[in-house]
Amino acid sequence: METFNEINDMYVERFAFIETLSREFVDKTGCGIYVFLSPLDIDQLFENFLHLGMPIRMFARQCIRNVLG
């Protein structure tokens, strides 16, 4: 069973991921992430991010290239 701290840490990490992803999209395109991705897409990206173990900004930039490319 997950403890409150583990669940809280996951929410904090997810929030940081979405904020960073959104900031990178705005910087590169002038639009937020929801112009390009659905909430379901973002959840799937977060799950992928957790398994890859790379820095959030690097992952976000890779996502932008994939979406715009």
Image: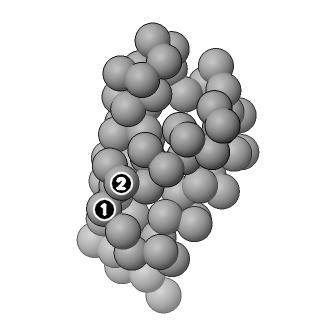
- The kind of residue tagged 2 is Met
Q: Residue at x 43, y 55 (%)?
A: 59
Left or right of 51 in this view: 54 = left
Q: How far across and down, in percent of the image, does residue 62 sit?
A: 49, 50
- Classify residue 68 by image quadrant: top right
Q: Which residue is mark 1?
A: 55
Please count the marks in the image: 2
Q: How far across and down, in percent of the image, does residue 47 sit?
A: 57, 65
Pick out the residue farthest to the top. 30
In this view, 29 is above or below 58: above
In depth, the one of 34 and 31 nearer the eye is 31
Pick out the residue farthest to the bottom. 1
Q: How far across and down, in percent of the image, does residue 33 sit?
A: 54, 28
Left or right of 31 in this view: 14 = left
- The kind of residue tagged 1 is Pro
State which quarter of the image contains the C terminus. Answer: top right
Circles 2 and 1, Cβ within 8 Å, touching? The answer is yes
In this view, 39 is above or below 28: below
In this view, 67 is above or below 7: above
Q: How is the image coloured?
A: one colour
Q: How far across and down, in percent of the image, does residue 43 sit?
A: 62, 51
Q: Which mark is residue 58?
A: 2
Mark 2, secondary structure of its residue:
helix
